Amino acid sequence: GGGGGGGAAGGGNVQMATLPSSLSGSSMSHSTFQMELLNKDGRIGIYLPEARKARIAKFHSKRKMRIWRKRIKYDCRKKLADSRPRIKGRFVKRSDMEEDEEL
Protein backbone atom coordinates (compact mmCIF):
# COMPACT_ATOMS: atom_id res chain seq x y z
CA GLY A 1 0.00 0.00 0.00
CA GLY A 2 2.58 2.58 1.10
CA GLY A 3 5.00 1.59 -1.66
CA GLY A 4 2.30 2.13 -4.29
CA GLY A 5 1.62 5.61 -2.94
CA GLY A 6 5.32 6.46 -3.10
CA GLY A 7 5.44 5.24 -6.68
CA ALA A 8 2.51 7.46 -7.63
CA ALA A 9 4.21 10.46 -6.02
CA GLY A 10 7.42 9.61 -7.86
CA GLY A 11 5.49 9.42 -11.14
CA GLY A 12 4.01 12.83 -10.40
CA ASN A 13 7.48 14.26 -9.76
CA VAL A 14 8.83 12.87 -13.02
CA GLN A 15 5.90 14.38 -14.89
CA MET A 16 6.43 17.72 -13.14
CA ALA A 17 10.13 17.65 -14.04
CA THR A 18 9.49 17.01 -17.75
CA LEU A 19 6.69 19.57 -18.14
CA PRO A 20 8.41 22.82 -17.01
CA SER A 21 11.67 22.05 -18.85
CA SER A 22 9.78 21.79 -22.17
CA LEU A 23 7.87 24.98 -21.34
CA SER A 24 10.93 26.93 -20.21
CA GLY A 25 12.79 25.87 -23.38
CA SER A 26 10.16 27.46 -25.63
CA SER A 27 9.61 30.55 -23.48
CA MET A 28 13.36 31.04 -22.99
CA SER A 29 14.00 31.45 -26.73
CA HIS A 30 11.04 33.84 -26.94
CA SER A 31 12.25 36.03 -24.05
CA THR A 32 15.85 36.14 -25.36
CA PHE A 33 14.47 37.24 -28.76
CA GLN A 34 12.64 40.11 -27.05
CA MET A 35 15.69 41.00 -24.92
CA GLU A 36 17.78 41.41 -28.10
CA LEU A 37 15.30 44.02 -29.40
CA LEU A 38 14.99 45.85 -26.10
CA ASN A 39 16.04 49.55 -26.26
CA LYS A 40 18.30 49.11 -29.33
CA ASP A 41 18.46 51.38 -32.41
CA GLY A 42 16.46 54.14 -30.67
CA ARG A 43 13.73 51.73 -29.60
CA ILE A 44 11.54 52.30 -26.56
CA GLY A 45 11.09 48.82 -25.14
CA ILE A 46 10.66 46.67 -28.24
CA TYR A 47 8.92 49.35 -30.35
CA LEU A 48 10.33 52.04 -32.58
CA PRO A 49 9.12 55.51 -31.51
CA GLU A 50 6.66 55.86 -34.43
CA ALA A 51 5.18 52.40 -33.84
CA ARG A 52 4.89 53.12 -30.12
CA LYS A 53 3.13 56.43 -30.80
CA ALA A 54 0.69 54.65 -33.10
CA ARG A 55 -0.04 51.97 -30.50
CA ILE A 56 -0.55 54.54 -27.73
CA ALA A 57 -2.84 56.62 -29.98
CA LYS A 58 -4.92 53.50 -30.71
CA PHE A 59 -5.14 52.74 -26.98
CA HIS A 60 -6.24 56.31 -26.16
CA SER A 61 -8.87 56.37 -28.91
CA LYS A 62 -10.31 53.03 -27.72
CA ARG A 63 -10.26 54.25 -24.11
CA LYS A 64 -12.28 57.34 -25.06
CA MET A 65 -14.95 55.09 -26.59
CA ARG A 66 -15.46 53.04 -23.41
CA ILE A 67 -18.98 53.07 -22.03
CA TRP A 68 -19.17 53.36 -18.25
CA ARG A 69 -22.94 53.53 -17.80
CA LYS A 70 -24.86 50.44 -16.73
CA ARG A 71 -26.46 48.77 -19.74
CA ILE A 72 -29.39 46.34 -19.40
CA LYS A 73 -28.93 43.56 -21.94
CA TYR A 74 -32.10 41.59 -21.31
CA ASP A 75 -35.28 43.48 -20.36
CA CYS A 76 -37.05 40.27 -19.32
CA ARG A 77 -34.37 39.47 -16.72
CA LYS A 78 -34.55 43.00 -15.33
CA LYS A 79 -38.34 42.77 -14.96
CA LEU A 80 -38.05 39.38 -13.29
CA ALA A 81 -35.43 40.64 -10.83
CA ASP A 82 -37.49 43.73 -10.01
CA SER A 83 -40.55 41.60 -9.26
CA ARG A 84 -38.70 39.21 -6.93
CA PRO A 85 -38.84 39.92 -3.17
CA ARG A 86 -35.67 41.28 -1.58
CA ILE A 87 -34.40 41.91 1.93
CA LYS A 88 -31.42 44.30 2.17
CA GLY A 89 -31.03 44.07 -1.59
CA ARG A 90 -30.71 40.27 -1.65
CA PHE A 91 -33.25 37.95 -3.23
CA VAL A 92 -35.24 35.87 -0.73
CA LYS A 93 -37.84 33.14 -1.00
CA ARG A 94 -41.37 34.26 -0.29
CA SER A 95 -41.46 31.86 2.70
CA ASP A 96 -38.32 33.53 4.16
CA MET A 97 -39.93 36.92 3.66
CA GLU A 98 -42.98 35.97 5.77
CA GLU A 99 -40.75 34.73 8.62
CA ASP A 100 -38.77 38.00 8.61
CA GLU A 101 -41.96 40.07 8.73
CA GLU A 102 -43.01 38.26 11.95
CA LEU A 103 -39.75 39.20 13.72
Image (cartoon, rainbow, N blue to C red):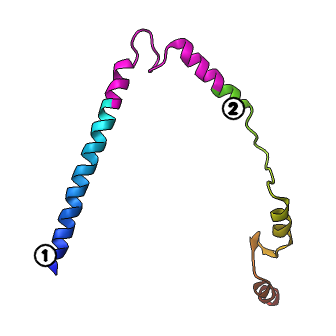
Q: Which residue is mark 1?
A: 3
Q: Main secondary structure of the magenta part?
A: helix
In whole angstroms, how far apart are the C-alphas of marks 2 and 1?
A: 59 Å
Q: Judge left or right: residue 101 versus residue 48.
A: right
Whole-percent x, y for residue 42 in the image? 44, 9
In the image: residue 47, left or right of residue 83: left
Image position of 37 (left or right of 69): left
Seen in the picture, residue 35 relative to 94 is either above or below; the reply is: above
**Which mark is first along the chain, 1 or 2?**
1
The residue at 20%/63% (across/down) is 11
- Name the residue nearer the viewer: 15 or 57: 15
- Please give the label number shown on residue 26: none
Is 21 placed above or below 34 here? below
| Neighbourhood count class around disc 2 (C-alpha, 10 Å): few under 14, some 14–19, many 20 upward | few
Q: Which residue is mark 2?
A: 63
**Residue 31: quarter of image:** top left
x, y (%) of residue 80? 83, 69
The residue that appears at 16% across and 71% down in the rendered structure is 6
Mark nearer the viewer, 2 or 1: 1
Q: Is residue 56 above or below residue 70?
A: above
How many neighbours does mark 1 have within 10 angstroms: few (below 14), some (14-19), or many (20 or more)? few
Identified at 48% across, 18% down, the residue is 47
Mark 2–mark 1 CB contact (< 8 Å)? no
| x and y, in percent, of residue 82 in the image | 85, 68
Q: Is residue 31 magenta?
A: yes
The quadrant in which the C terminus is found is: bottom right
The magenta stretch spans which residues?
A: 30-58
